[in-house]
Image (cartoon, grey):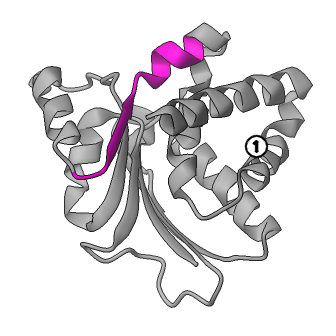
């Protein structure tokens, strides 16, 4: 078993929380884990990317080579396209459809979404809207994790356990909202 995931987005969208949840789930499953991240610009709404490698055998490098990512999980549509060179030919692009417009010349959203939909394997979800409907607008990252979960080689109950571990210090209500967000995203992908 091996899953190489590029997590992409903009500072403040919860990329590092997704990585922490998957890391906790991988360790609970006795998997090996390597991660490399860039988040120095996160205070200014800059790009954030994390390479996350999970396997049932030792992993030599924390960086995913171009053309080898099994999943690009992006909480921002433009960022999903930025990392397409890393995607394996049979890899999945799982992207939020809600843009984070942080530059004056942000590309046309319809063209971005069309490009994403032209990938051989893709799932696009309005994670922001889904999170608001659940009652936790900040949980769009967990909606995205749920949408990607059918393509990650970690049992769903282990990912749920990771959510509990990461959010438990914020109280049971926050844990439950994040689990609801995760399930909403997962159910969306499974229905596709």
**Secondary element at image label 1:** helix
The picture places residue 14, in percent across and down from the top left corner, at 55, 37
* Residue 35 against residue 19 in the figure, above or below: below
Residue at 65% from the left image edge and 34% from the top image edge: 182
Q: For this rendering, which residue is in front, 179 or 119?
A: 119
Could you say which quadrant of the image residue 70 lies in?
bottom left
Q: Position of residue 130 (x, y in %)?
A: 53, 17
Q: Quadrant of the N terminus?
A: bottom right
Query: Horizontal and vertical percent for residue 51?
Result: 45, 64
Question: Which residue appears at 54% of the width and 27% of the height?
Answer: 140
Q: Which residue is mark 1?
A: 163
From the viewer's perspective, tell me whether residue 113 is left or right of residue 19.
left
Res. 192 in view: yes
Q: Position of residue 123 (x, y in %)?
A: 37, 39
Up/down of 128 relative to 38, above or below: above
Residues 16 and 31: in front is: 31
Q: Is residue 160 above or below residue 87?
A: above
* Range of magenta residues: 120-132
Residue 58 falls left or right of residue 88: right
Instruction: Inspect the magenta stretch and tell me whether residue 91 lies in it.
Output: no
Task: Place residue 9 in its image quadrant.
Answer: top left
The residue lying at 74 percent from left, 59 percent from top is 25
Q: Is residue 170 left or right of residue 127?
A: right
Instruction: Decide: is 28 above or below 119.
Output: below
Q: Residues within 10 Å of mark 1 (few under 14, many from 20)?
A: many
Q: Quadrant of the C terminus?
A: top left
Residue 13 appears in the figure: no
For image coordinates 61% across by 90% down, the residue present is 58
Q: How many marks?
A: 1
Left or right: 169 with respect to 71? right
The single residue placed furthest to the front in the displayed view is 191
């Amino acid at each position: 078993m091996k899953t190489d995931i590029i997590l992409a987005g903009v500072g403040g969208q919860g990329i590092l929380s997704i990585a922490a949840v998957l890391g906790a789930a991988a360790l609970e499953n006795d998997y090996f884990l390597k991660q490399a991240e860039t988040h120095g610009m996160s205070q200014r709404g800059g790009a954030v990317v994390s390479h996350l490698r999970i396997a049932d055998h030792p992993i030599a490098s924390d960086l995913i080579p171009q053309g080898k990512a099994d999943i690009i999980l992006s909480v921002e549509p433009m960022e999903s396209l930025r990392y397409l060179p890393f995607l394996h030919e049979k890899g999945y692009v799982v992207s939020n459809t809600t843009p984070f417009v942080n530059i004056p010349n942000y590309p046309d959203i319809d063209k971005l979404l069309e490009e994403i939909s032209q990938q051989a394997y893709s799932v696009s979800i309005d994670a922001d809207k889904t999170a608001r409907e659940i009652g936790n607008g900040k949980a769009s990252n967990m909606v995205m994790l749920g949408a990607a979960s059918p393509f990650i080689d970690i049992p769903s109950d282990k990912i749920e356990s990771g959510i509990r571990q990461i959010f438990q210090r914020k109280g049971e209500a926050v844990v439950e909202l994040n689990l609801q967000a995760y399930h909403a995203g997962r159910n969306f992908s499974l229905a596709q």
